[in-house]
Amino acid sequence: MGKKRIALIVVSFILCLALSGFASDIRFGQFEGSFNAPPEPRLLYPITDEVILTGKDFLEFRWRSNFFEADHFIFRIYKGYNMYAAGLVYKEEIKASESSIQVKADLFSDGQVYTWSLIQVSNSGCKSDKNFNSFKIIKK
């Protein structure tokens, strides 16, 4: 393919985008969909298969977010691997300025699997995808 033909294809593509309104929607932030959703927070701990709670009063959950327009996080803990309402054992909304939460060790049973999830909510109310991890509790 010649250089002129490639240039013509590129220009045609850009023109089609501009005429369809797609490019202006993105530029002005009016495009509905995943472009408006905040990124998922990054889970830091626990992200291992097993968590040892022997002699501990709390289990600390930690995460990181580089999203500056966050309003708060939605933190949940479920019993088992499935994240259904019936398995929900703990839920809390946490300020965007926080990057950890301590949950009492009494909530967790020895040998039981739990799944924690975190959603980031922007100032405009848009929610990120859920980031989650499962772990088994060991209380020796």
Image (tube, rainbow, N blue to C red):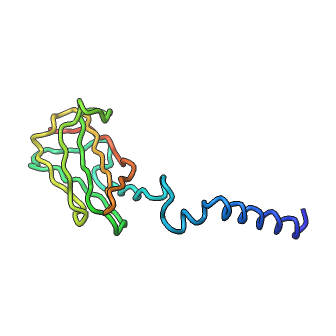
Residue placed at 25% from the left, 62% from the top? Answer: 99
Residue placed at 32% from the left, 33% from the top? Answer: 82
Answer with left or right where residue 132 lies relative to residue 107: right
Quadrant occupied by the C terminus: top left
Residue lying farthest to the right in this orientation:
2
Answer with left or right where residue 40 lies relative to residue 28: left
Decide which of 20, 39 is in the foreground and name it.
20
Answer with left or right where residue 28 lies relative to residue 7: left
34 to 79, vertically: above or below: below
Residue lying farthest to the top in this orientation:
86
**Residue 72 drawn at (x, y percent):** 26, 59
Quadrant of the rendered structure where residue 123 is? bottom left
111 to 38, vertically: above or below: above
Quadrant of the rendered structure where residue 89 is? top left
Quadrant occupied by the N terminus: bottom right
Decide which of 111, 12 is in the foreground and name it.
12
Number of numbered callouts drawn: 0
**Residue 137 drawn at (x, y percent):** 22, 39
**Residue 8 drawn at (x, y percent):** 83, 66
Residue placed at 38% from the left, 53% from the top? Answer: 128
Quadrant of the rendered structure where residue 44 is? bottom left
Residue placed at 32% from the left, 56% from the top? Answer: 125
